Structure formats: structure tokens, C-alpha cells
Amino acid sequence: MKHVTAASPLVKQLVSGDPRALARSISLVEEESAEGRAILKAIYPRTGGSRVLGITGPPGAGKSSLASRLVGVWRGQGAKVGIIAVDPSSAFSGGAILGDRIRMQEHCLDPGVFIRSMATRGHFGGVSRACRDAVDLLDAAGYGIILIETVGVGQDEVEVVQIADLVLVVLPPGLGDDIQAIKAGILEIADLFVINKSDREGADRLASELSAMLALSPDAQTARTPILKTVATLGTGVCELTEALEAEWGRRDRAAARASREKERSRARFLELFREGLYRRAREACLPSGKVDAIAEKLAHRRQDPYSAAEEILSRVRFSAAPRPSSSNGKRR
Ligand SMILES: Nc1nc2c(ncn2[C@@H]2O[C@H](COP(=O)(O)OP(=O)(O)OP(=O)(O)O)[C@@H](O)[C@H]2O)c(=O)[nH]1
Ligand SMILES: [Mg+2]
């Protein structure tokens, strides 16, 4: 394994803000390589300074258009902005990445903007782990604001935006009765709602339905979630939105609240890595290839029950055994 330290050339280039080093590091992290992991270790002390904003909402709500507007404002203020567009990698969203690229075109040549797409599938430990690692890399590379765009359709996406310090939920009018169908989970993760496409009919109705719905929330914080209206294509309401974000950030920046959220996230992150490592190690030690298949066969034919099967294998896991040398070697699966 290549020994990567804070003084390694790639790490040095990354922290000096070289976009190629950043792109390379994100790839190494996505590939789950030992080098990627070593980079993450080396840069960790330099992270924690960026503001991370999650943008989620139904397909086509205008998330990318809005993101592009926000990027314009922040660039005007001199901040470097990193964008991670999470692609649900389904057959239905084949054009999503291209679409995001097109709407970000005006920022494509700006060296202060770094855009990266990330597929939801194909990450051991889920896309949220890969995304969080990418956020750390962007943070270390000096991107003061990091935007994560996801289509709010599933659990994966909900988990991803929880990496963010602040979550913006974008809704278009015309959802009609669908407002009832908006997943409760999505309502709860919103720090701010944006009704985009307010040039279309139904924006006011959606706003009042939404605020009525929020008012029913037993959680006082959720009940007070601000609702703003925008027309991303024209830039209408974007100024108010950036001010509202600023106010929210100001509020959240209050040391205690921020520290406790950060600690919660750190706890979850550690436990996730721990669980992942434990599972991998136990699986390598107790489930040689073909074993799971054989167990599945037995269960399917009712020759054994799943509880006994799991207990039997788990009884072979020995925690006192000396750990193998760094399990981050090579690829998993
Ligand atoms: N009329 C109107 N159209 C808009 C507005 N904002 C975005 N659009 C259009 O809506 C379409 C989708 O916009 P996107 O920004 O790609 O939406 P998105 O939520 O990022 O879409 P996905 O990433 O594919 O889920 C585009 O054709 C935009 O031009 C708006 O405020 N009003
Ligand atoms: Mg988009």
C-alpha cells in the first residue's frame, strides 16, 4: 500500500485547491481504495469549515436551476462553491446528469466552481458515505460552500441530504393532492421550503397547504420552517432565498446547536464505518464463498430456520482474535 501522509504530493495539491487533485481524490475515495482512505485521514484535521447545503425535491422541481442561481450569488461574494449532484442511476433519469450539466453550464468554466456527479448505486456503505467523504475533500480543497443536490424520492436521497448543515426542499406547484403524498420524512428534514416555478398556477395554494401541514407538526421547529417562493428561470426570489439561508446559517452557527449536530453526525459516521468494517471482517472470516448460497438453499427448503442459521454463524465470530492488518487494503465486496 502506498503510504499517504499530509505531506504527500496529491494531498498537498488537494489542499492548495488544485481541481485535478480534487477530482482524482474523489475518484480514489469512490473506488474505496486504500489511497483514498489515507487521503481522508490526512485531510480530516483541515475539514469542518465549509457550509454544506442540501437541495432535494421531486424530479424536475427546479433544483439545478435554483442551485445555479445560488452559485451565481455566492460567486459574486467571492466564495468557492463545490456541487455534488447525486444521480439516482435509474433508467428513468438517464438524462439527469446531462441536464444538471447543462443548467450549470454558465459555471462550468469558472475555476471557483467544482461540479461532480455521483451515482447512488455502486457504493459499498451507500452513496451517503461516498458523498460525505467527497464533502470532506471539497472542504479541505477550500470550497467554502458545498451544495449537494439529490432527487428526493427514496431513503438513499434522504440520507444523503442529512449530511448537510441545512436542507432546502424544493417543491413545484401542481402537485395537487400529491402534497399528502410528500413523504413525511422529507418534510421533517427541511430547514427551508422553496416553492419554485411560482410563475405557474397553484404556487399560492401549495404554500398555504404546506404551511397548514407544517402547523400540525408536533415539533415547534418544524412548524416554523420558512416557506419561500422563487422562479429560478428568472431569478425571482433568489435574493430573498440567499438572505433566508444566511439567517438560518447564522442561527445554526450558534456554537452549541452546531456542535451538537456535528457530534451526532460524527457518531453516526463512526458507527457506520465500524459496522461496515465489522461486517466485512466477520464475513471474510466466517462465510467463505458459496456458504451464503448453501444457507439460502437450506432455508428455502425449510431444512433450517434463518434465526438458527444466523446464530450458528455468529457463534463462530471471535472478537479476541488479533485484527488483520488494515482492512482498507484493496477493494471489498
Ligand atoms: N416555469 C418555470 N420553469 C422552471 C423554473 N425553474 C426551473 N424550470 C424548468 O424546469 C425544468 C427542470 O429544471 P431543473 O432545474 O433541471 O430541475 P431539477 O429539479 O434539477 O430536475 P432533476 O435534477 O432532473 O430532478 C427545466 O426545463 C427548467 O428550465 C421556474 O421557476 N419556472
Ligand atoms: Mg437537477
Image: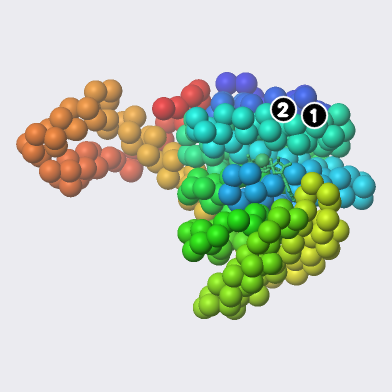
Task: List the single residue furthest toward the front.
Answer: 201
Establish if 328 lies above or below 320: above
Tag 1–tag 2 contact (CB < 8 Å): yes
Name the quarter where the N terminus is drawn: top right
* Crowding at mark 1 (Cα within 10 Å: few <14, some 14-19, many 20+): some
Q: Position of residue 134 (x, y in %)?
A: 66, 38
Which one is in front, 226 or 172?
A: 172
Which one is in front, 315 or 122?
A: 122
Residue 20: name its quadrant.
Answer: top right
Residue placed under numbered mark 1 in the picture: 19
* Crowding at mark 2 (Cα within 10 Å: few <14, some 14-19, many 20+): some
Instruction: Give the residue displayed 27% in from the left and 40% down from the top.
Output: 317
Q: Position of residue 324 (x, y in %)?
A: 42, 31
322 lies left or right of 204:
left
Name the quarter where the C terminus is drawn: top left
Q: Position of residue 254 (x, y in %)?
A: 75, 69
Q: Position of residue 206 (x, y in %)?
A: 63, 65
Residue placed under numbered mark 2 in the picture: 23
Establish if 35 lies above or below 197: above
State the SS at label 1: helix
Question: Can I make out residue 100 in this image?
Answer: yes
Residue 290: name its quadrant.
Answer: top left
Residue 136: name its quadrant.
Answer: top right
Which one is in front, 5 or 78?
A: 78
